[in-house]
Image (spheres, rainbow, N blue to C red):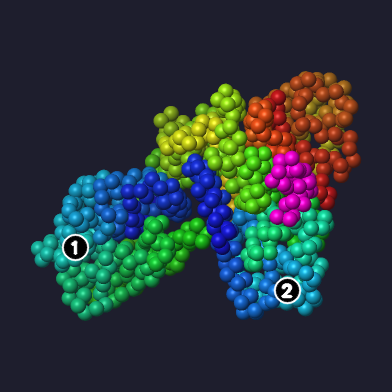
Amino acid sequence: MTEKKLAILHLSDLHIGTHSMADHACAGWYRHLVLDIVEQVRQRPLHELFLVISGDITFSGKAEEFDATAEFLKGLMHSIGLRHDRVLLVPGNHDVSWGTRDDSAWCDFVTLMSGPQEHDLGPKADAPLRSFFEEKISFLMLDSTDASHYPERELRRLNDQMEQVSRRQHSVIAVIHHLNRIRSRRMEDMEDPLNKLLRKWSVNVVLHGHEHSQSSQSAVETDAWVSLGAGPLSPERWRHEYGAPSYHILEFAEEQIAIWTRTFVEQTNRWIQGTGSPLGTQRLHRGITGSRPALLTSGVGVTSERSDADQRRGLVEELAALSVHGIDQLLTCLGPGALHFIPAREARSDFIVRLVEYFASQDSLDVLRDTLKELRLIEGRERSVMLICATVADDEYVEGLNENAKDLGFSVRRATIGREIEGVDAEEAHGVSWDDVDLLLLVLSGAALDVDATTDELPFVASIAFERGIRVVLAAAAKCVIPAQLQGLPVIDITRERTALRLQMADVVGRTLSGRYECKSENG
Amino acid sequence: MIACKSFHNRLLQSLPYTVRTFVEGTLQSLASSEAALNVLKTSINGLISERDADPAPTIVAIGSFGRLDGHIMISDVDVIHIYAGAMSSSRVDELHEFLRDLIQYNAGLLFDHRREILERRFNFAASPAYPMIAADDLRIGDNEHRALQLLTEGRVLRNGHGVGDIRAELLAGFGFSDDISRLNMGKFRSALAHYRDSYCSGVMDRATGAGWSLSNKKVIKLFALREFSYLATLFSLAEVSLAVALGTGSVATALERLSSPSVLKVASFCDPAGPLAGCVNKLSGAAKKRITKLVQSHVKSLPEAEQMAIVEDIVNPAEGEFFREVRNLTVAVLKQYDCLLTLLHDSGFLASIEKFEPDVTSWLGRPPYQAVLRAREKMLQRARLLAQTLSECLAIVGESGNFVIEHANAPLEEIAAYELRLDFAAARV
């Protein structure tokens, strides 16, 4: 039984506009963001993950902007295997259609993303508190888009809910767009009823957005709580006057919260590990009331073995880590029946989801998993294996070839065929498995051709290699008559002296491994 | 850096949407190279204004940053000083001091022999790094490689006024003329091939322990990028010759094309306003159909996924069917180049390469090196296909009798016959 830890992916100020996903560069920027998130989440596989977005999700609160955002978020959720009930959203000032104050687009969006709730904009406390894991942790979702104070009636209801939470010694994380609505340093703020209520019930952490500044992106400990700002996460809005784009992953452990801040560096066009540090829980417990509840004294949620869904999610994560080149290689290994990936028409993350779905529908996910494993195995190997296959009559040449192959960086195995051991089972008798072989070197001197059965066996061995997609090179004497079945294969002249032989071997083997000879034979 | 910026912008503007999506990795390199050169230029200007140097040196970036395909984490910044007239020993010392300051103030950029230079232990005279050359000497045959560098990958960082004339003169020396009857770029092609070969041999000498330190990741990167740069320059030479055949070739446009970033040199064939378009548009309807069919037949030889790259939501009617097909072939080259760059910029991959022995031949049995070989070969296959196709197209253009196509055809044929350069012969065995 493995206990899962809690983690929160905190995004803010995405500012997705109508053209954000239509514009190539802009959509590419968001894709890049998703890939970085996927990579980060992949490194934390056993976490119970929540996605918290602290407002300014769209640029101006238009329905079409929410549609574009929903598409983006669905892709992200799919890529990291996030359920709808783990998505927590609060609005920001950019999510309000200020002309009409029509909330329907926001309500539809939130319903779509995190399930049906009461979502009217404005300071209402109908359902601001969402609890998880037998109510060990609660999120207080605060709407700060209306500048007015929370109505007293709503505050009373919120107070009642918080009282319940407090009795159960919950951890409470407040999410709000405008931190200045509850900032606790000024006396007048402390007189604000909402501020007083949050202090009274000892909120542990406040996640916020809006500020777009470097300083707000680090955890700030106040006398009441620890606040942490994310964003901006938009390619247009960060370029000049704002802080660099950033998001956080908060990992909750028994003794601390680790805050991993990811920051985008424009100059290198990369996401990097930014500032971020572990916060000791004792700091979070020290509230002004002295009654702040312990923060997750033990992990939340329990899991046993990984479920099918988890495994599928893991596979998506593994695939997401592949480069474009890696995807190309994977598709080559999967063969012509597999899907095509055309970057011009599809984001890599979307393709990966499609690939996994495609295999799922044919009940053949294992094929994909095994192929990926095989690819990793090949990539993970230190040296390629060259199988030198010769008759006993060619021993004098094998030694030189063996040494040269080792010098070229290969791990060498040897199989003897001919009179002594008949058939291809010979390699099994020598402990060689075809599965490990990357290149077959068939030695073919005039002497070898005199050995009984060799004339048939060498082409037979070559045919097995062909079937398995193993590249084949002949090491033959210059005047040797090559059997018709083996003609056209790249040839090394084994009668050369060692240095010249090594150079020729390097050249021929190099070209064979690069696929050049393969290409020639295809064309032929 | 106005010059670089304009190249970058030109690249973005001239590339159709589909092409751009395939060269994201390359654009990343362009942007980072540009950023590095901007930093360098600012630093150079600052240092020179402090010193009030007279005459101000001409400084040109060459190598991967000059080609705008540098990678800040692994590429060295190479610069060359060009001066007019004679050079006194005090002036040489002054320039070395200037270089020392430049390196010191740019801690974020990689420079060859940084430590030795900063500690004043580096012997400039005995090293080919940080060359200083008189403008007059560039015209001498012995400095053919420097002349080529200036023409094909030179990016002026300081005092560009004097360089323009030298470059025009050098180009003429290599056989360029805007008159098709006098054009003969054979010397340029052979110099280019010689430059590539000698460079690879030089690198290999250093890699095999001839007293030079060169990290494995740089060796593997240099081979791949040099090869692509060579092929891309041959492509641009074909375009330059085509422009002259069309009557639109000038020294300025030739210099711009030949010193463009490698990606642009390949991608510009699918520019509906380029010289290829100028020739094709003057063909008869029947010839246009024939030429389109020809390109389509080559596109069909691509793997299915690459053929489908042509599908786009927004079709540019001005582009026409022929150029959409040419674009498909161009995209195929760029995509493979992008895959190669992705591999070469992957930190995990580079870390694995760095563990290899210095002898390049011993890398053959290593899977990461094989991945590079495969990626290079795939890129070459697509380049050969594009060159072969363009060459066949030019044959049809030539049949019309309107243009002399031999000069444009020669570099294309060279690409079509090009094979993967393993350069093991240069290795010390």
* Residue positioned 82% across, 24% down in the render: A482
* Residue projecting furthest to the left: A153
Left or right: where does residue B307 sit relative to residue B386? left
Residue B306: say if magenta. Answer: no
Q: Residue B24: image x %, image y %? A: 52, 48
Residue B170 shows in the view: yes
The chain containing the residue under callout 2 comes to: B
* Residue positioned 45% across, 33% down in the render: A359
Q: Quadrant of the C terminus of chain A?
A: top right
Left or right: where does residue A255 sit relative to residue A338? left
The residue pinned by badge 2 equals B96
Q: Residue B94: image x %, image y %? A: 73, 77
User: Is A249 in front, or is A170?
Assistant: A249
Give SS at disc 2: helix
Q: Quadrant of residue A472?
A: top right
* Residue positioned 87% across, 22% down in the render: A450
The chain containing the residue under callout 1 comes to: A
Q: Which mark is residue A146?
A: 1
Q: Amino acid at mark 1?
A: Asp
Extent of the magenta region: B168-196
* Residue positioned 33% across, 56% down in the render: A15
Q: Amino acid at mark 2?
A: His
- Cα–Cα gap, marks 1 and 2: 64 Å
